[in-house]
Image (spheres, rainbow, N blue to C red):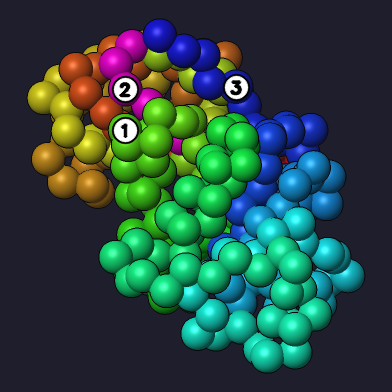
């Protein structure tokens, strides 16, 4: 059983992995990225990161979309993997884990190609199950966390929440406006709402929880 805190601009992690989707613009991911202790860029994500005046700590890629000038400039922190069984996000995750970073925030992992977005979101649960870690995917609208079993999630009253079933046969919740269940289809897990400062979920498997920054009828920031 775990307690999952709210994510805001003061949240910290061991490392941030920046993917090559939409570059963060919301206050929360922008601040988290600016204050990050360690930033690992996936392939061409380093182009946007450097353009915003930053220097990465590591770059992990297969080298197919990284400009030659940046390959040369960052040769000492460039880690190239040519195998194609896993995407750059997973390659970057494996590298960070090998360096001792286990508490990882993922930014820039949504947007642009929808198939990449869907794949990256699903990887959060896969990383939890296969790498024994608790990743957090942070977007410009909210954040995803994978969980399994019985857990508590900090919320604000009116905060929008979606619960996506991975492999559960039952999901029971407290602190939500509408009853939860082990949805068969992804859309069935969307658009719930916190009724207080905590949501409790008890399930017999794994699931993904998405919480928005915005409170219905108000604004967090």
Magenta-colored segment: predominant secondary structure:
strand
Q: Say which residue appears at 68% left-offset and 90% top-offset.
A: 68
Task: Determine the secondary structure under disc 3.
Answer: loop
Q: Is residue 150 left or right of residue 16?
A: left
Q: Is residue 9 left or right of residue 126?
A: right
Q: Which residues are magenta?
A: 145-150
Task: Determine the secondary structure under disc 1.
Answer: helix
**Residue 96 point in image, percent of width and height:** 58, 46
10 Å neighbourhood of mark 2: few (<14), some, or many (≥20)? many
The N terminus appears in which quarter of the rendering? top left
Q: Is residue 2 left or right of residue 172?
A: right
Q: Say which residue appears at 32% left-offset and 36% top-offset.
A: 130
The answer to which of marks 2 and 3 sits earlier in the sequence is 3
Quadrant housing residue 207? top left
- Numbered mark located on residue 5 in the image: 3
Look at the picture and state if 27 lies above or below 151: below
Cα separation between marks 1 and 2 = 9 Å
**Residue 92 point in image, percent of width and height:** 53, 56
Cα separation between marks 2 and 3 = 16 Å
* Of the pair 159 and 217, the residue shown nearer to us: 159
Evaluate whether residue 31 shows in this view: no
Q: Say which residue appears at 29% left-offset and 65% top-offset.
A: 85
Quadrant housing residue 169? top left
- The residue wearing badge 1 is 129
Quadrant housing residue 102? top right
The answer to which of marks 3 and 1 sits earlier in the sequence is 3
Q: Say which residue appears at 62% left-offset and 37% top-offset.
A: 101
| Residue 121 belongs to magenta span | no
Look at the picture and state if 143 lies above or below 4: below
Task: Determine the secondary structure under disc 2.
Answer: strand
- The residue wearing badge 2 is 148
């Amino acid at each position: 059983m775990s307690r999952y805190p709210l994510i805001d601009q003061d949240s910290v992690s061991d490392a941030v992995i920046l993917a090559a989707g939409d570059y963060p613009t919301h206050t929360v991911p922008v601040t988290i990225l600016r204050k990050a202790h360690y930033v690992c860029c996936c392939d061409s994500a380093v182009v946007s990161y450097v353009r915003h005046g930053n220097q990465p700590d590591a770059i992990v890629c297969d080298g197919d979309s990284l400009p030659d000038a940046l390959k040369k400039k960052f040769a000492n922190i460039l880690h190239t993997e040519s195998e194609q069984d896993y995407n750059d996000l997973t390659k970057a995750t494996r590298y960070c884990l090998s360096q001792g970073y286990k508490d990882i925030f993922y930014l820039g992992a949504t947007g642009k190609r929808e198939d990449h977005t869907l794949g990256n979101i699903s990887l959060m649960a896969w990383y939890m199950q296969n790498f024994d870690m608790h990743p957090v995917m942070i977007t410009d609208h909210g954040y995803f966390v994978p969980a399994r079993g019985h857990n508590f999630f900090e919320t604000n009253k009116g905060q929008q929440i979606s619960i996506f079933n991975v492999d559960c046969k039952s999901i029971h919740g407290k602190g939500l406006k509408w009853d939860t269940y082990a949805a068969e289809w992804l859309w069935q897990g969307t658009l719930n709402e916190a009724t207080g400062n905590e949501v409790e979920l008890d399930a017999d498997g794994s699931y993904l929880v998405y919480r928005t920054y915005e409170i219905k009828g108000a604004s967090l920031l």
